[in-house]
């Protein structure tokens, strides 16, 4: 499983019939993301809605 599959921005697009990154970024942001070598995506947001609840238990 990739880190994208756990991201809140990873959504199913019915038009393309595949999962895509739904992060709202402009062309400059996307170009910078593709040109750099990141160990982790700077836009990653944990999509686990119950993480806080499990932490409180």
Image: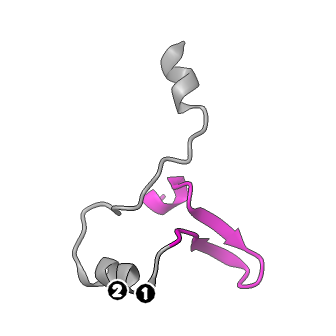
Residue at left offset 76%, top offset 84%? 15
Residue 13 visible here: yes
Question: Which residues are the magenta region?
Answer: 1-24
Residue most extreme to the right: 14
- Tell me residue 21's x, y (percent): 54, 71
Secondary element at tag 2: helix
Residue 2 visible here: no
In the figure, 28 relative to 54: above or below?
below
5, 10: nearer the viewer: 10
Task: Answer with left or right where residue 54 lies relative to residue 30.
Answer: right
Residue at left offset 34%, top offset 86%? 31
Q: In which quarter of the image is residue 44?
A: bottom left
Task: Answer with left or right where residue 36 lies relative to residue 51.
Answer: left
18, 51: nearer the viewer: 51
Secondary element at tag 1: helix
Residue most extreme to the top: 57
Mark 2 closeness class: few <14, some 14–19, many ≥20 residues within 10 Å:
few
- Tell me residue 42's x, y (percent): 33, 61
Cα distance in 3D space between marks 1 and 2:
6 Å
Residue at left offset 46%, top offset 52%? 45
Residue at left offset 67%, top offset 77%? 18
Return the mark for residue 31. 2
Mark 1 closeness class: few <14, some 14–19, many ≥20 residues within 10 Å:
few
Name the quadrant of the C terminus.
top right
Task: Provide the residue designation for mark 1.
Answer: 27
Task: Answer with left or right where residue 46 lies relative to residue 43.
Answer: right
The reply to whether dot 1 and dot 2 touch (C-beta < 8 Å) is yes
- Tell me residue 12's x, y (percent): 69, 69
In the figure, 40 relative to 30: above or below?
above
In the figure, 52 relative to 24: above or below?
above
Judge whether residue 25 is colored magenta. Answer: no
């Amino acid at each position: 499983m990739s880190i994208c599959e756990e991201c809140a921005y990873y959504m199913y697009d019915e038009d393309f019939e595949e999962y895509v990154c739904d992060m709202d970024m402009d062309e400059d942001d996307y170009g910078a993301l593709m040109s750099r070598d990141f160990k982790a995506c700077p836009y990653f947001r944990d999509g686990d809605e119950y993480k806080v609840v499990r932490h409180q238990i």
